[in-house]
Amino acid sequence: MKRVLVMVLALAATLVAGCGTSEPESIVDDDTLLIAVRQDLPSIGFLRADEEFEGFDVDVARYIAAKLGKDFLFVPVLAADREQVLLDGRADMVVATYTISQDRKAKVLFAGPYHISYQDILTRRGETIDNVRDLKGRKICEVQGANAAQRVVAERSVAAELVPFADYAQCLAALKNKQVDAVTTNDVILAGLAMQDGSGLRLNNAQFNEQRTGVGLRKGDVAGCEAVNRAITDMYQDGTAAKLLHKWFDGSGLNLSTIAVPQFEGCS
C-alpha cells in the first residue's frame, strides 16, 4: 500500500511539473484568430457603414492570417484598449497602429515592425506651425491610450498643452472648430484623416520621432511572433507591402519612394 501511494504521489508531481513547464498558448495552434484592428482611422483601420473593416492595417492583418493559414475575425479596438484586449483574451493579435515602445513591451510581445513611419503634425491651413518646436504654448490633441502627444512634451521638451480626446475623429473635429491647434501622431494616420476630411487640412511633413508599428501578441508567444515575422518578410519581398501602401496613401503627400523590409525587434 505504501509503495502504491508513493507511485501516485510521484505521478502527480510529474504532472504538476509538466504543467509548470508547458509552452504558453500560441496563435500557431489556433484555427481562428481574433484580430484587433482600429475602427476610427480612415485608410488605416476603419469601420464602414456596412460594418466592413477597411484600410492598410486591415489588409496587413488579412495577409498575415492567410500566410499563417488561419481563419480570422476582426475585433474593433480604440487606442486605449489595445493592450487590454490581449491581456484579457478578447484578441489574439493586435494590428492597430501599435507603436513599439519599452513600456508596452513589458506587457505584450511585438512581432515586426511591419511599417516604419514618422510622427508628423496636422494643422489648419494658414497656421504658423511648421515643426515640432512651433508647438510650444499650443494646444495639441492627445488621444487616450496613444503616446504621440506625450512624446512631444517628454522627448522633445516642447511645452505644449495636451487636450485629451477619446479618438482621432474627435481630434479632427476639435482641430476644425479651433479647440486645438494641431494633431500629432504617425504620418500615415494624419494622411488618412486629411484625405477623408477633404477640407484642406495641412500635413506638415515635419518627420520627427521614428514610429515602429508592430503586431501585438500575448507575452511569451515566441512561436507566433516568429511566424508573423516570416509573413511580414514575405509581404515585403513579394511586393504586397508596396502595393498596399500605394493603394491607401497615394496622393496623400507621404513619401513612398523607398519601401524596404523593416529591421525586426526580435521575439525573445
Image (cartoon, rainbow, N blue to C red):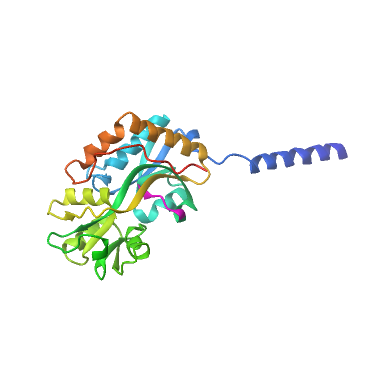
Q: Is 131 left or right of 16, judged from the image as shown?
A: left
Residue reaching furthest to the right: 2
Q: Is 213 left or right of 141, judged from the image as shown?
A: right
Q: Position of residue 255 (x, y in %)?
A: 23, 44
Q: Nearer the viewer, residue 197 or 120?
A: 120
Q: Position of residue 40 (x, y in %)?
A: 27, 51
Q: Position of residue 135 (x, y in %)?
A: 25, 65
Magenta stretch holds residue 104 = no
Q: Residue at x 50, y 53 (%)?
A: 106
Q: Quadrant of the N terminus?
A: top right
Q: Is residue 94 above or below residue 166?
A: above
Q: Residue at x 32, y 28 (%)?
A: 238
Q: In which quarter of the view is residue 164 placed?
A: bottom left
Q: Is 268 left or right of 193, judged from the image as shown?
A: right
Q: Nearer the viewer, residue 56 or 102?
A: 102
Q: Nearer the viewer, residue 159 or 47?
A: 159
Q: Is residue 144 above or below residue 99?
A: below
Q: Nearer the viewer, residue 138 or 132?
A: 132
Magenta stretch holds residue 100 = yes
Q: Residue at x 27, y 39 (%)?
A: 258
Q: Residue at x 86, y 37 (%)?
A: 3
Q: Is residue 166 above or below residue 26?
A: below
Chain part drawn in magenta: 97-102
The answer to whether residue 88 is visible is no
The number of numbered discs placed on residues in the rendered structure image is 0
